[in-house]
Image (spheres, rainbow, N blue to C red):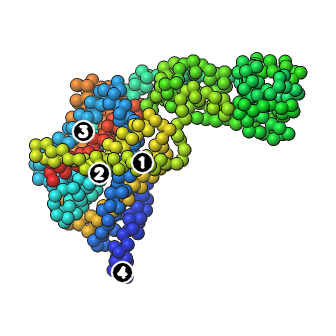
Amino acid sequence: MWKEFSSFLIANPIISIFLALAGGYFIGKFKIKSFSLGSTVGVLLVGLLVGQLGIFTIAPILKSVFFDLFIFVVGYEVGPAFIQSLKSSGLKLVVQSVFFSVVGFGVAIILFKLFKLNAGEAAGIIAGSLTQSATIGTATSAINGLNISAAAKATMTSNVAIAYAVTYVFGTMGVTIFLKNIAPVLLRVNLKDETKKMVESLDIGSDDRNVSPLLSNMSTRSFQILQTPKENLTISRFEKDFHNKVIVQQVFSKHKPQTFDSHTVLKKGQVLTVLGDSEDLWKVMQAGVYYKEVFDDAYRKIPLRTVELMLTNVFNHHALSTLIDENIVVIDATRDGKKIEDLSTLTPGDRLTIAGPDRSVKKVLPTLGYAVDNSSETDVTFMSIGIVLGILIGTLVLTIGGIPLTLGAGGGALFSGIFFGWYQNKKAYLGNIPSATRWFLKSVGLNLFIAAVGLEAGSQFVKALGSMGVQVLLIGAVISILPHVITLFFSKYVLKLNAIDNIGSLTGAGTINAALNAVSEETQSSVFSISFTPAYAIGNVLLTIMGPLVVALLG
């Protein structure tokens, strides 16, 4: 019975992949305070367990498709923040993030050379100890490009997954404990006191700096046309008669709403629902011979619209001041993902979210820019072209000192994603990938790849783990902690970073979300996120490309 069941799963690897996915996501939900294995480690462990049943063979192209979708979307998401961080005023955070990656890579290579580890083990340790799952994929892609036998490639690929599984837990838990409990001691600060000072200096929580147009005097009235003051009175002419301060929002004929535009000719007996300032609406009421106010709530329902838009070169601050006249409110304004408090500083390229009557929004939109595409549809053409270009970039080989360096398909797709994500942020009318789609491709795309890797590595897991022993775990622990210690002191004494930015940026540079959550919970403040964000964008890129670099140097 068991033999038949094992044979069935081996013969139908697609079932085994989804079993690993189901079990892995279930395991990944469990938390101990701020720590959880997460879905990726859970899927890998279940995959390795199911892989004990025998030798699974999964088409390499299937794994490549899963991983390329995942890594492109990672680049797409971090692209805008990554590009911005390279040119922003927070240069110290950029330097710290790059320094951490360089030190981490240097420490790792020294240990790998010293203990004579192969490229597969080394790449897995990098991925696990620095908690960057994407490195598994970029390393695997680079291994497949090596001029070695298929058996040697399979062994190396298995070693990547196994070494990752062995080192990941300490890479997460150890670094989280270090940054939350030990780093403040080394810096000789009280983290809660430093957080309080930082919050006070930034004046976080103050809401008196945001000067937005408000709908303070907006009023709605409905008027029946008793007779038109002139022949062929259009909507546009009616609004001009009241200096464009009274805007038609609805037109009713025999109690039914009618479609209309600025050229629609008004007729006797129709009811207009208009929006405007109380003083201007009074002028309509004074024209009693032509218009009679109707007190019926059925006419007062005005379609409102909320739009996120990108300001372009057509924008000027006069257009912003007219929003009040059009009864439109500014809900939010951002620049490179950061909130803009003073609307007088708005420039082309910023994003503005406005709300108001549908017709008013349509009227002002051309004077501001264009609406951002926030639909639920994915621009598959845009995404596919990006992945194709990324794979082509990954085929390029640069030989330095006799060592061939290549990003591989995964690394190429990452950099292509960064560019396409940055470009889409600037040209928001194309290339939309909704957040739900991005989550699916990042999470399920990666974990389908990980499930396949785990299943293929499972049959070698026990043997490889025995040969690696405690050595891999200890090497991983050193790579996890030592770069953080060195960078911590470098940032304090060379970069002169305060403790909050120092620790917050390190959680980002090492892409340790669990550590960010831990220090935020400890201090009950989200101020660490300020330095985490740019560092996280850089860390995602630099740690991911360590995979092919390690393979190139040790392969």
Left or right: 396, with 423 as reference point: left
Q: Earlier in the sequence, mark 1 or mark 3?
A: 3
Residue 180, placed above or below residue 213: below
Marks 1 & 4, CB-CB < 8 Å contact:
no
Q: CA distance from mark 4 to mark 2?
A: 38 Å
Left or right: 468, with 229 as reference point: left
Q: CA distance from mark 1 to mark 3?
A: 29 Å
Residue 17 position in % (x across, y down): 38, 65
Q: CA distance from mark 2 to mark 1?
A: 15 Å
What residue would you read off at disc 2?
409
Crowding at dot 1, Cα within 10 Å, few <14 / some 14-19 / many 20+, comes out as many
Crowding at dot 2, Cα within 10 Å, few <14 / some 14-19 / many 20+, comes out as many
Q: Nearer the viewer, mark 4 or mark 2?
A: 2
Q: Earlier in the sequence, mark 4 or mark 2?
A: 4
Q: Residue at x 33, y 80 (%)?
A: 3
Q: Residue at x 16, y 63 (%)?
A: 149
In the picture, the disc for residue 101 is 3
Q: Earlier in the sequence, mark 3 or mark 4?
A: 4
- Secondary element under disc 4, as helix, strand or loop, is helix
